[in-house]
Image (tube, grey):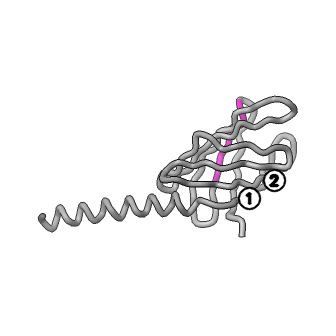
Amino acid sequence: MTIRRFAASALFVLAAAGAAAYAAGVAGKWTAAIDTQIGVQNYTYDFKVDGEKLTGTAKSQFSESPISEGSVKGDAISFVENLTYQDMTMRVVYSGTISGDEIKFNRKVGDIASEDFVAKRAK
């Protein structure tokens, strides 16, 4: 194996390890206060990670929903919450960027609203 090929292989392994560290690092509880059309919603997210697959729960003072269609790839995170509010189910799509103990999120609540917020790791 040449030095160049060895270096390229080593960089690939380090990049893959870094992506796995981001994914594993997001597991656990996160909290956020989201300013919405119906007032501030206080959320607790409980993330579980298996490889790049993200599952868990999203819980507010109004409801608790399982997380579906979740993924963590590098510092990018995304998932869906099927929120039930006043007997209506709405698809809420989250996308965000992980940075240490913060995640900068945007969530799209059906065709009703788009909200930016920051979630912080619960301590």
Residue 91's tag is: none
Q: Which mark is residue 31?
A: 1
Q: Is residue 86 left or right of residue 50?
A: right
> Does label 1 or label 2 sit earlier along the sequence?
1
Residue 44 within the segment the image draws in magenta: no
Q: Are marks 1 and 2 in contact (CB under 8 Å)?
A: yes
Please state the extent of the stretch shown in magenta in the rendering: 104-110
For the point 27% across and 65% down, the residue is 10
Residue under the image location 85 percent in, 30 percent down: 87
CA gap, disc 1 and disc 2: 7 Å
Residue at 53% x, 61% y: name it. Answer: 24
Residue 94 at x, y = what percent? 64, 43
Which image quarter: residue 2? bottom left
Disc 2 secondary structure class: strand
Q: Disc count in the image?
A: 2
Q: Give the amino acid type for the residue marked by disc 1 in the picture.
A: Thr
Q: Nearer the viewer, residue 15 or 27?
A: 27
What crowding class fits label 1: few (fewer than 14 Cα within 10 Å), some (14-19), or many (20 or more)? Answer: many
* Magenta stretch: helix, strand or loop mostly: strand
- The spot of residue 111 in percent (x, y) is 71, 29
Q: Which mark is residue 42?
A: 2
